[in-house]
Image (cartoon, coloured by chain):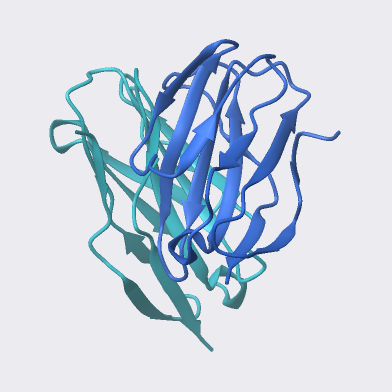
Chain colours: A cyan, B blue
Amino acid sequence: AQKITQTQPGMFVQEKEAVTLDCTYDTSDQSYGLFWYKQPSSGEMIFLIYQGSYDEQNATEGRYSLNFQKARKSANLVISASQLGDSAMYFCSGSSASKIIFGSGTRLSIRP
Amino acid sequence: NAGVTQTPKFQVLKTGQSMTLQCAQDMNHEYMSWYRQDPGMGLRLIHYSVGAGITDQGEVPNGYNVSRSTTEDFPLRLLSAAPSQTSVYFCASSRVQGARNTIYFGEGSWLTVV
């Protein structure tokens, strides 16, 4: 069975520091995508960034970037220069030939 | 842009009652799915559909039924509500099921079973 593993239930980071959130996708599919979503306290799911398994480059979107390790099927999210507004739950999602599943999430708290 | 629309947003049910959560999307997406999110937890896949007339079970399908008679609609039915089904439910859609497609979420439906 497929599984997304996020090993950090919660993290505290000082404002303006960079933070890395872990994600590993257990799948037998060779073609897959890894997504990151932010869920603030208001509850909506906000798409952040995507990495395809065949993409040559690591994905970047503004302050968000992915450290993609293909052999491990992991796509760790790096948030540079963290801001107070980054405090939220962060979910990693894996999409492949059969379904789209989510990890258990990481609660990120930014300290002023 | 309507995107993915879920109704109702809030619902309180008594144990044993049945109800249907509605989900509609206007983006002509083939892939639709339902997730539940318990407090402080991630999203767990209930059922999904890769096109009209095709549905399949996800990680936690028990107690729920779905159907996909049209591309636009993907209702989720609770057959006999139980307190364990108290959760926030998200409907989502994607252009086609596969690696490169961003998932669009509804705003969520808060369900309480008493």
Does B110 sit left or right of B60 as displayed? Answer: right
Q: Between B48 and A91, which is closer to the camera in this rendering?
A: B48
Q: Is residue B83 above or below residue B45?
A: below
Q: Between B61 and B25, which is closer to the camera in this rendering?
A: B61
Q: Residue at x 34, y 58 (%)?
A: A104
Residue lying farthest to the right in this orientation: B1
For residue A71, say whether it is visible. yes
List x then y, in percent, for residue A75: 30, 43
* Residue B15 in which image quadrant: bottom right
Does B77 sit left or right of B26 as displayed? Answer: left
Q: Residue at x 37, y 52 (%)?
A: A77
Please count the marks in the image: 0
User: Quadrant of the image for the C terminus of chain B?
Assistant: bottom right
Q: Is residue A92 above or below residue B111?
A: above
Residue lying farthest to the left in this orientation: A71
List x then y, in percent, for residue A68: 28, 39
List x then y, in percent, for residue A14: 43, 83
Q: Is residue A38 above or below residue B79?
A: below
Residue lying farthest to the bottom in this orientation: A112
Does B101 sit left or right of B11 as displayed? Answer: left
* Residue A24 in which image quadrant: top left
Q: Residue at x 40, y 79 (%)?
A: A13
Q: Between A76 and B72, which is closer to the camera in this rendering?
A: B72
